[in-house]
Structure formats: C-alpha cells, structure tokens
Amino acid sequence: MLLCKLCRLAAGIAAIAVVTVATVHATTADGIAAGKSLAMERSKGNCLACHRIEDGVLPGTIGPPLLAMKLRFPEREALKQQICDATIRNPHSRMPPYCRHGILTDEEVELIVDYLYTL
C-alpha cells in the first residue's frame, strides 16, 4: 500500500517535472505604443540617441539601425538581454546596461521589445 502511494507520488512529481511552463507574452496595440514611447523617451530608452529608427527624428549613428528586429533577434530573450545589458554579449559595447543601472524595468523592456518587433 505504501509502495503504491510512493509510486503515485513519484509519477505525479515526474509529470510536473516534464511540464514546462512558458510565459506567453500577449502583444497589444497599447503595449506597442507604450514601447515606442519608452524607446523614444530621453529619460528612458532614448534609442534614437544612437540608432536610426524608421519614424525617428534626428537619429544617432553610433549603433546599428533598428530594423528587421525579428530577423536579427529571432529569440525574444536575446533581444531583451541585449537591451538589459549589452556588455554580456560584447564587453566593449557602448550601449548602456539599462536594467543593471535601473534605467528600465523588466516590464518596460518587454514593451520596448514589442515595439522593436514591429520594425
């Protein structure tokens, strides 16, 4: 009897271990607009200071143009990491580590990625 209970418990634990929980990120028009606003805002993303963006005014040229972002970063996490701390991938990057320095929150980075994926 105890052996059966242990078997069922082990089977339940194994089933839980096999199931992976993925966070589904729902992109909305409002989220994209908020991400664009954050990307353009000087006190937040300020992406235009270094990057050319499709509808941006007076873009910088230090960083690469922000276009075809889904092709360049097919993995959403890779783009988020690039925004949060580009020095992880390139220790000599000029891009500020936005998350490490507290300039952007994880939620704000999610919104910016939503916007960048429309470019």
Image: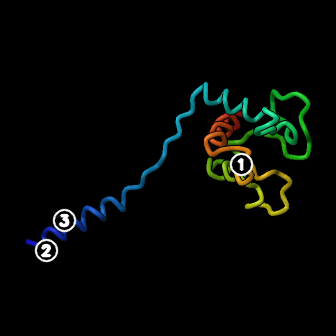
Circle 1: residue type: Gly
Evaluate if marks 1 and 2 touch, with contact meaning CB atoms under 8 Å apart: no
Furthest-bottom residue in view? 3
Q: Earlier in the sequence, mark 1 or mark 2?
A: 2
**Callout 3 crowding tier (Cα within 10 Å): few <14, some 14–19, many ≥20:** few
Q: What's the colour scheme?
A: rainbow
Left or right: residue 10 versus residue 42 is left
**Under tag 3, what secondary structure?**
helix
Disc 1/disc 2 C-alpha distance (Å): 52 Å
**What is the quadrant of residue 100 in the picture?**
bottom right
Crowd tier of the residue under label 2, counting other residues whose Cα lies within 10 Å: few below 14, some 14–19, many 20 or above: few
In the rendered image, the quadrant that contains the N terminus is bottom left
Distance CA(mark 3)–CA(mark 1):
46 Å
Instruction: Give the mark toward the camera: 3 or 1.
Output: 1
Q: Is residue 75 above or below residue 56?
A: below
Give the mark nearer the N terminus: 3 vs 1.
Answer: 3
- Please tell me whether residue 8 is drawn above or below residue 52 in the rendered image: below
Check disc 2 and give the amino acid type: Leu
Q: CA distance from mark 2 to mark 3?
A: 9 Å
Q: Which residue is mark 1?
A: 102
Q: Secondary structure at mark 1?
A: loop
Residue occupying the point 78% across, 32% down? 41
Say what amino acid the circle numbered 3 marks: Arg
In this rendering, position of residue 49 left or right of residue 22: right
Residue 104 placed where, x, y %?
A: 70, 44
- Residue beneath label 2, please? 3
Tag 3–tag 1 contact (CB < 8 Å)? no
Residue 91 is tagged as none
| In the rendered image, the vertical position of residue 110 relative to residue 93, given as above or below | above
Circle 3 sits on which residue?
Answer: 8
Q: Residues within 10 Å of mark 1 (few under 14, many from 20)?
A: few
